[in-house]
Image: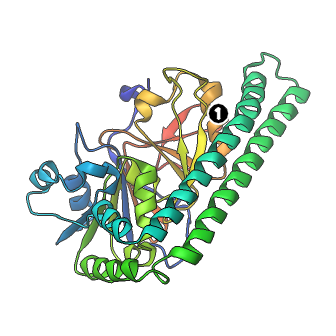
């Protein structure tokens, strides 16, 4: 378990900001840890000087979407939910062709993930064995680098396949081709334009991403400050990586699961890292950090907050980054 006593809870300003996007990046974007036990959303908004009307996206909660009592109590004012999950169900009920195409795409994604896992199991087992080897000779170090390179190629290929499936679906079934989606998008764009802040909650990351993509909200969301936590933060990176070093069964291989929206580049977000990362196993930590490079892996636990301004990490509180040597360093420190 990640030792909280070793973590720096104080906010730190980053002196060596890392460029992660273009000028079209979101002006202010906050990525937070889980908000269930120790919510810090209000504190993060105040620290970033963000206020005004708030709209929320809670599609990842699925049937529990729009249960905003705890969120509104924490913020001290009403929050309007955009109800993406409910809107999608209503559209599917009226557009059977769209629903069938959506289900077909989801089936293809599931099969693609299954095939990727078969290859990943073998590639990850080889890399793990090499990293655990006591021999540190030049030949072993070269073999480790080759094993990491093989994992990166596999991940990159898988990400391309995922993006291809999404691209084909959106080219034929997006809001530009389905009137029901177009009407919903127009309404959502107005609600977002009237808000000062958009909050994106966690939950089921695939459901959340699918609804965001279904309504084509990428452009509208980029116009407003965003605060996202847990799976909501994962969805805003370029890659969604599932990880659990202590699973009930299996090897616990971190896997590239989805293509994110890419609002934050060169970053991989790891919610609940304190319980899911084997932080006392430097070989596993180093393997994940090197495999995801040049992207940086950031932990997002209770109380953590990362503030991105125009595509650069501006400040960090609590979050740590995984290092290539198998340790942890404050998220705001220079690599």
In the displayed structure, would residue 214 be above or below residue 318? below
Q: Quadrant of residue 164?
A: bottom right
Q: How far across and down, in percent of the image, does residue 161 sit?
A: 69, 58
In the displayed structure, would residue 270 be above or below residue 327? below
Depth order, front residue of 327/224: 224
Q: How far across and down, in percent of the image, does residue 113 sit?
A: 63, 45
Q: Residue at x 27, y 82 (%)?
A: 190
- For numbered disc 1, what is the local secondary structure? helix
Q: Residue at x 43, y 50 (%)?
A: 205
Q: How far across and down, in percent of the image, does residue 219 sit?
A: 44, 78
Packing grade of label 1 (10 A; few <14, some 14-19, many >=20) is some
Counting every numbered tag in the picture gives: 1
Q: Quadrant of residue 14?
A: bottom left
Q: Is residue 145 left or right of residue 71?
A: right
Where is mark 1, residue-wise? 286
Q: How far across and down, in percent of the image, does residue 326 sit?
A: 61, 31
Can residue 256 be seen here? The reply is: yes
In the displayed structure, would residue 246 be above or below residue 110? above
Depth order, front residue of 234/18: 234
Can residue 325 be seen here? The reply is: no
Q: Residue at x 50, y 23 (%)?
A: 246
Residue lying farthest to the right in this orientation? 139
Q: Is residue 140 left or right of residue 94?
A: right
| Color encoding of the figure | rainbow
Depth order, front residue of 306/278: 278
Q: Residue at x 44, y 23 (%)?
A: 1
């Amino acid at each position: 378990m990640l030792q909280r006593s070793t973590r720096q809870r104080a906010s730190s300003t980053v002196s060596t900001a890392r460029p992660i996007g273009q000028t079209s990046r979101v002006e202010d974007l906050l990525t937070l840890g889980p908000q269930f036990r120790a919510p810090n959303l209000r504190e993060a908004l105040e620290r970033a000087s963000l206020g005004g009307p708030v709209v929320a996206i809670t599609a990842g909660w699925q049937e529990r979407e729009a249960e905003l009592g705890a969120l509104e109590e924490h913020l001290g004012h009403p929050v309007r939910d955009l109800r993406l999950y409910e809107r999608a169900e209503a559209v599917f009920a009226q557009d059977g062709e769209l629903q069938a195409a959506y289900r077909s795409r989801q089936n293809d994604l599931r099969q693609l993930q299954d095939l990727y896992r078969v290859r990943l199991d073998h590639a990850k087992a080889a890399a793990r064995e090499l990293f655990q080897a006591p021999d540190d000779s030049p030949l072993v170090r070269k073999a480790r680098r080759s094993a990491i390179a093989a994992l990166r190629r596999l991940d990159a290929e898988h990400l391309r396949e995922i993006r291809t499936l999404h691209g084909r679906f959106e080219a034929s079934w997006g809001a530009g081709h389905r009137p029901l989606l177009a009407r919903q998008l127009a309404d959502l764009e107005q609600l977002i334009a009237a808000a000062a802040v958009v909050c994106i909650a966690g939950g089921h990351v695939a459901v959340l991403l699918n609804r965001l993509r279904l309504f084509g909200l990428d452009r509208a969301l980029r116009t407003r400050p965003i605060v996202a936590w847990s799976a909501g933060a994962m969805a805003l990176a370029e890659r969604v990586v599932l990880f659990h070093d202590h699973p009930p069964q299996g090897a616990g291989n971190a896997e590239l699961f989805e293509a994110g929206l890419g609002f934050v580049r060169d970053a991989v977000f790891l919610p609940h890292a304190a319980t899911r990362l084997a932080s006392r196993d430097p070989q596993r930590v180093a393997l994940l950090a090197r495999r995801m490079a040049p992207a940086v892996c950031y932990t997002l636990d209770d109380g953590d907050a990362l503030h991105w301004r125009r595509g650069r990490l501006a400040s960090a509180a609590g979050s740590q980054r995984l290092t290539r040597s198998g340790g942890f360093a404050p998220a705001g420190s220079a690599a």
